Image (tube, helix red, strand yellow):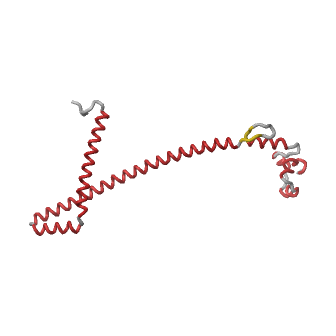
Amino acid sequence: MAYFEFPHTRTYEGDLGYLLKKMKELSDITAYLQEEFAKIVVLTEAQIEAMINAAIAANNLTWANELQNLKNQITIEYKGYVTARINALTVYIDNQDVYYDLLAQGYATTALTEAKAYTDSEIDISTMMINPITGEYEDVREVVNDIISYFHSQDSLTAAEYDALDLTAAYYDGKQLNAYDYDFNGKTLLP
């Protein structure tokens, strides 16, 4: 005889039916407990106390002790049930928070990746223009370089040449050069 016997040859079908049956049983038990709880909740603690006191007065000391023990047991079991339900709900809610946090992070990561890809592709497209020197459709950075190269003369001053002049700030400021003069005639106007 096998350790486990399944009513179906396909274990997933048997497992599903078994799980559905057990879930129904648990649902029925929960509904029953909720009905019983509703009956208990209807009574206030004072009402329960009055009922117990009336029973104690009507019966002998043995019955009074039994009722008090029963009250204590119900209170303990009820508190245990409520605590267990609260704990189960807390775990469920915490798990949902984690699930939705991960889901939101996934959506955010995907959205950011798509936005970056779109932005990068649009930037590549929008940085193109017709080069007035070559007449070709080129990256704007190449166009600017071509324009500067086209207009720079032999009197243009490179950074290395400027550094080699070893000029003071006062001397440079005294020349009062504008950007055009510096860019195109720096070699002749600075020394």
Residue at image coords 13%, 65%? 64
> Residue 145: horizontal and vertical position, in percent?
78, 42
Q: Nearer the viewer, residue 21 or 108?
A: 21
Q: How many marks?
A: 0
- Placement of the N terminus among the 4 image quadrants: top left
Residue at image coords 10%, 68%? 58
> Residue 31: horizontal and vertical position, in percent?
26, 52
Which quadrant holds residue 17?
A: top left
46 left or right of 113 in image: left
> Residue 41: horizontal and vertical position, in percent?
25, 62
Residue at image coords 30%, 34%? 13
12 left or right of 66 in image: right
Q: Nearer the viewer, residue 26 or 166?
A: 26
174 left or right of 56 in image: right
**Which residue is the extreme one toward the left?**
60
Which quadrant holds residue 122?
A: top right
Which quadrant holds residue 133?
A: top right
Residue at image coords 37%, 50%? 92
176 left or right of 36 in image: right
> Residue 104: horizontal and vertical position, in percent?
48, 48
**Is 5 above or below relative to 191?**
above
